Amino acid sequence: MSSFDPAAVRKAVEEFTRVLKKGGTAVFSIPNYSSIQNRCKFLFKGYLEKPVYREDYENSESNVYNFHNSPLTITLLNTMFEINGLEIIEIRRDKVKVKQFLLLPLVLLFKLIALLSTSGQKRKYGYHLTLRNDVVLGGNTMIIILRKR
């Protein structure tokens, strides 16, 4: 799946839930837009995915697969999972990206800010998910292992 329409992803999660037995396990993988590298790219460049131009669309025979409608972050995915009775039991990364460790001081600053936040802020901003090492220092792909409640 290279184009992420949130409504289509929501439907996919609903289908996961429908076919999965209670206590069953599912694996969901998606680009890791929550990594520190992607967060910095957005901060400094203003985009998460390389912009797609009209020429790209026309050269691809009018396919829209390269149009990323909405980057799905771990917090948005978790909400979709919870609504459908799925819980995250593990998050894995596809590979360790050595360049991200250059951004480790920034990650530690984020974690310090989270540590000093109120419990309400921690819950509101989903720090328990967004600052997990396997997310913030994850590779290009987030691999989420789910269980149906």
Image (spheres, helix red, strand yellow):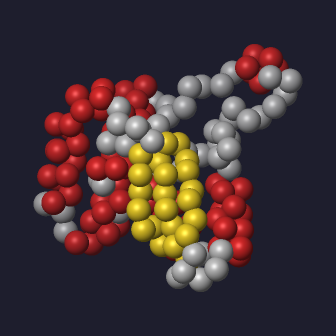
Left or right, 94 with respect to 14, comes to left
Q: Name the residue nearer the viewer: 111 or 96.
A: 96
Give above or below for 45 relative to 72: above
- In percent of width and height, residue 132 lies at 30, 54
- In percent of width and height, residue 44 lies at 37, 27
Query: Which quarter of the figure is the N terminus placed in?
Result: top right
Q: Name the residue nearer the viewer: 53 or 101.
A: 101
- In percent of width and height, residue 106 lies at 21, 38
Residue 33 visible from this viewpoint: no
Residue 22 visible from this viewpoint: yes
Residue at (27%, 65%) from the top-left corner? 122
Residue at (56%, 26%) from the top-left corner? 50
Give above or below for 96 relative to 130: above
Residue at (49%, 57%) from the top-left corner? 144
Residue at (49%, 52%) from the top-left corner? 143
Left or right, 116 with respect to 21, comes to left
Q: Name the residue nearer the viewer: 127 or 16.
A: 16
